[in-house]
Image (tube, helix red, strand yellow):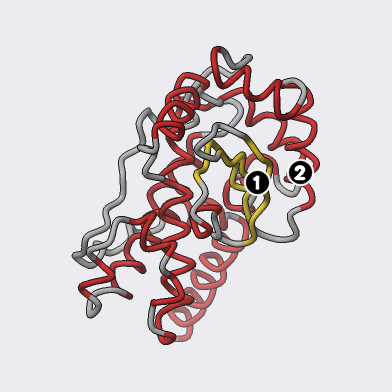
Amino acid sequence: MLMTSRRAVVFAGAASGVAAIAPRRVWAQAAAPAPAPAGPFTLPPLPYAPTANEPSIDAQTMSLHHDRHHAAYVANLNAALKDHGQLAALPLAELLTKLPEVPDTIRTTVRNNAGGHANHSMFWTVMGGKGGDPWGPVAAAITRDFGSIAQLKEAFQKVGLGVFGSGWVFVSVDKGGKLALTPRPNQDTPLMEGSSVLFGNDVWEHAYYLKYQNRRADYLTAWWNVINWDAVSDRYAKAQAGSLPL
């Protein structure tokens, strides 16, 4: 009995030591999240493989960001609205403009998770590209409103680094095609004020920490390598036509 007890203690200590030295391995292999509550909002699939943005954004970050973080926003939003059928029936962008009409008891939850769902749905679509320079009408708009793509990148970097804690940096676009650079905290979005988003970058740490740790500046710089200018150009045309949903 004494030997058995000692073996049990040694085994338990060894197991705890393995866990202590390999936290990322355990975390990466965590069980899949529970199915999202049924509801009107769904997680859009990634429009490319998780590896598509490497080496600028690693596949593990893409998978965790989409499959865990974005999925959680969708699940939480559906759960918050399950007893509010009229609100749940609204298109996501319209719901975000009507936050003052959302009951106090769920308004913060809806704000955070509807914003997170909208921001990430946009985010996936403007990546998966090869970077480089924009072309066509969106390039002309960038030159007109920022001076050049180089000047936009410089200003975007400064604004992104200036976001305290978690948030986003967006390029918004009005119906006349005018662009503006705007940060937002947490999961807020220009959609809440009725503005359209041309593109934006997520500066929450979960978007970059596995590869860049605390080096947000490096992440912001590398992100331009995977922007999809074809997708951004399409969004610009839709924004001018009033048909850009998110």
Along the horizontal axis of the image, is 81 left or right of 205?
left
Q: What residue is shown with label 1?
A: 169
Q: Which residue lies furthest to the front in this view?
A: 176
- For the residue pair 226 and 168, the one nearer the viewer reads as 168
Q: In this view, does 171 lie above or below 9?
A: above
In the rendered image, residue 231, in percent from the top left (x then y), is placed at: 45, 25
Disc 1 residue type (three-letter): Val
Foreground tag (2 vs 1):
1
Point 41% across, 45% down: residue: 246
- For the residue pair 111 and 60, the one nearer the viewer reads as 111
Quarter in which the N terminus is drawn: bottom left
Q: In this view, does 206 lie above or below 208?
A: below
Q: Distance between the residues labelled 2 and 1?
A: 16 Å
Q: What residue is shown with label 2?
A: 215
Point 50% across, 38% down: residue: 175
In the rendered image, residue 21, in percent from the top left (x then y), is placed at: 62, 57
Question: How many numbered dots are placed on residues in this image?
Answer: 2
Task: Compare marks 2 and 1 and give the one earlier in the sequence.
Answer: 1
User: Crowdedness of circle 2 by 10 Å Cα count: few (<14), some, many (20+)?
Assistant: few
Along the horizontal axis of the image, is 71 left or right of 154?
left
Q: Is residue 215 above or below residue 146?
A: below
Residue 188's disc number = none
In the rendered image, residue 142, in percent from the top left (x then y), is placed at: 66, 24
